[in-house]
Image (spheres, rainbow, N blue to C red):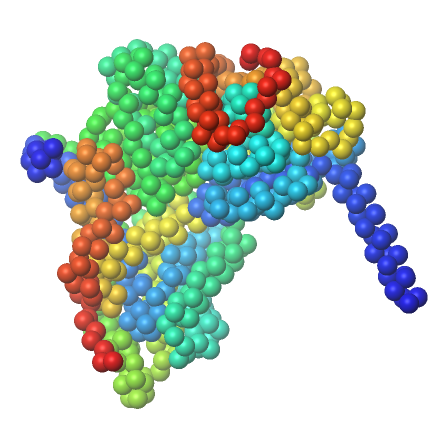
Amino acid sequence: MKHFTKLATAVALGTVLGTAAIAQELYTPNLAYRTGPFAATGIPLMNGQADYMTLLNERDGGIGGARIDFEECETGYSTEKGVECYEKTKGQAIVTQPWSTGITLQVLPKTNVDQIPILAPGYGFSPMADGKVFQWAFNMPAGYWDAADMIVQYLESEGSLEGKKIAFLHLDHPFGKEPLPVMEMHAENKGFELLPIPVGLKEMQNQSAQWLQIRRERPDYVVMWGWGAMNAGAITEAVKTKYPMDQFVGVWWAGHDADLKLVGEDGKGYKSISWSFPNMDAPVMQEIKERVIDAGLSQTNEEEMQGVFYGRGLVMSMILAEAIKNAQENFDTAEIDATQLRWGLENINLTEERIAELGMEGMVPPFSTSCANHTGHSGGWMLEWDGTKFVKASDLLTANVEGYSDLIAEASAEYASSNAPWEMNEECSATN
Amino acid sequence: MLNDIFIAPFVDMVEAPDFLMQVLWEGLVSGILYALIALGFVLIFRSSRIFNFAQGIMVVFAALTLVGLFAMGVPAWISVGLTLGVMFVLAVVIERVVLRPLVGQPDIILFMATIGITLFLIGFGETIFGGENKVMITEELGIPTGDTVLEPFGGLLILQHLDITVVIVATLLVAGLLAFLNYTQMGRAIRALGDDHQAALSVGISLQTIWVLVWFIAGIIALVTGIAWGARAGVSFALEVIAYKALPVLMLGGLESITGAIVGGLMIGILEKLFEIYWGQPLLGGNTETWFAFVLALIVLLFRPQGLFGERIIERV
């Protein structure tokens, strides 16, 4: 009996202490993909995300005194596993980061019921920009429709698109089809021919048929919506078929240093729109090197650290950290919940000054969010491969959101009606 | 519509013969690579009745081992030798640890065991080599990387030296394999085991030795395939999915037939490319390569359930 009492006391004490320990943490799970066919893209991004949170934990003791538990749940980029990870982590989570358009579309209706914010920086469903309808979903700092608009703007800056032909090489997957409405709208308005060319998941490494079609059709430009192994496959085929690299532009997920290193000098001139840039001179990079990498707390390496994707991972975690800080200050508590974090995400105001204060000058354009605007529409830079690395090839481009705001409203309303009953944010009075 | 199906494609072929030659060349290169992967499956199936689900991951594992060893400072050709050593050790371990304890078990158990091998190699490979995309050591191995531009019929035909090398090496490998299987004692033992398991065992053919040998040969094929595909688009775990392309090849050619794997691979490689370019892209929006080979194989199976070159098995019940 005496032993039983001691054991019960120990268990009770352990539970209390354990609960206290959990309460001091902000549980921000990441549905990561470090394995499978898309791992090459995922690893640097996940490393960047994790390293920024590690920096905050090591340097500041977390955010507002609460440590960040940035647990990863491995999905292998599989939608089924992603949903399992969401269900497994949602109990304690104040945010979910689904990391694929397929997973985002699956968990989107669930988060509206579970009331957990989805943070999908630069990916997911573009109409998530409408915060009144998608009150729990965020894809800041820019969405795919922004990317499509900026790419078309950039191509137009090189000369009228009237009568020209643009091949749209895309992964045959929800992600790859996402920008089609905006591309089709521009094709109609600007008078160019849009030629969609799908690439199946099993054909990512063997795109000779797609590039034979490109050779036959002789498009003026190729716009690529690629992910993972598709990008390397496309870039090597472009070199092989001698397609002019300066007429080849990709979305931000098709701008990975490792993919371009496969072709090196032959890839010179290839471009990728991007809302992030790896500025090695930014103070945050030095701090990460000293406090995280040199301290052996990171899985990254010197080469990966200089790439676009690692830097983007850092920016993603910075956005989440900024939202957490906003919420903590507004609600005067370190231990914020999911609803409070939603407020934080809706009140991001990343000015040039604030970005500099965070030591990230030049790494992300300024942007702000509101209850109605969950994307921020930061704009982006056109990056260009110079044979060894990506460099900025344009000033900051901004999407003309007004041009497709009707599309956003239509797609949001359609989503809400087909998922009825769909709870919206009726209290939001902001217009953008 | 009838014009688009029955006339326009052939008019296109005649009007642009250089482009047709390019399509046929690309189809031939793909077909040879499909045939190589299918050969790995066939060899193991013939000798052990095991459908080796792990063939795809063996391609990734062999390629990763090669570039991994090179990254550690081992010279390129010594890395190739060491990789072959690793594939041999893998064959021995698979035979000793996985297959030998399962002798006599139903085929489905052995098939499940190869799924286990796949999952193990994925995890083991990712732990050792990481999941990042790696550059194949093409130049270091002396594989030519430029191209030859021809102008047949006043048009344009680009032949990548890498593809030419792949075609030559794959052809030599297949010829070597056929010679090995037909003219050596070990090769005949493999074929005997495939023809009649019990009879082969009764004349003293060692099941264990043959299994190690065929898994090692499958490992060699995996390494060649890994180098060829890796040189085209990098070495990553995405390479594993190309193994699925061998499934319709096996359905078409027959699981036991080496000739079937070669002819099936070439047929699918060339026909799927022709269909995609001349019918799929203009009429169906493209991306027909994901299903064309399976439909073709199913049509063949309707008339020849054993595949084009498979053996018709009649069992008394």
Q: From the viewer's perspective, is A162 left or right of A92?
A: left
Q: Position of residue A9 (x, y in %)?
A: 88, 56
Q: Residue at x 52, y 18 (%)?
A: A377
Q: Is residue A65 visible?
A: yes
Query: What is the count of numbered marks?
Result: 0
**Rendered image quadrant of residue A305:** top right
Q: Residue at x 54, y 25 (%)?
A: A134
Q: Residue at x 21, y 27 (%)?
A: A217
Q: Quadrant of the C terminus of chain A?
A: top right
Residue furthest out toward the front: A421
Q: Position of residue B167 (x, y in %)?
A: 23, 52
Q: From the viewer's perspective, is B48 left or right of B237?
A: left
Residue furthest out toward the right: A2
Q: Quadrant of the N terminus of chain A?
A: bottom right
Q: Position of residue B86 (x, y in %)?
A: 45, 64
Q: Is residue A390 visible?
A: no
Taking A82 as reference, is A101 above or below it?
Answer: above
**Rendered image quadrant of residue A376:** top right
In front of the other: A177 or A293: A177
Q: Residue at x 41, y 77 (%)?
A: B105
Taking A172 as reference, is A17 above or below it?
Answer: below
Taking A278 as reference, is B268 above or below it?
Answer: below
Q: From the viewer's perspective, is A162 left or right of B209?
A: left
**Rendered image quadrant of residue B104:** bottom left
In front of the other: A277 or A66: A66
Q: Position of residue A262 (x, y in %)?
A: 40, 39
In front of the other: A78 or A385: A78
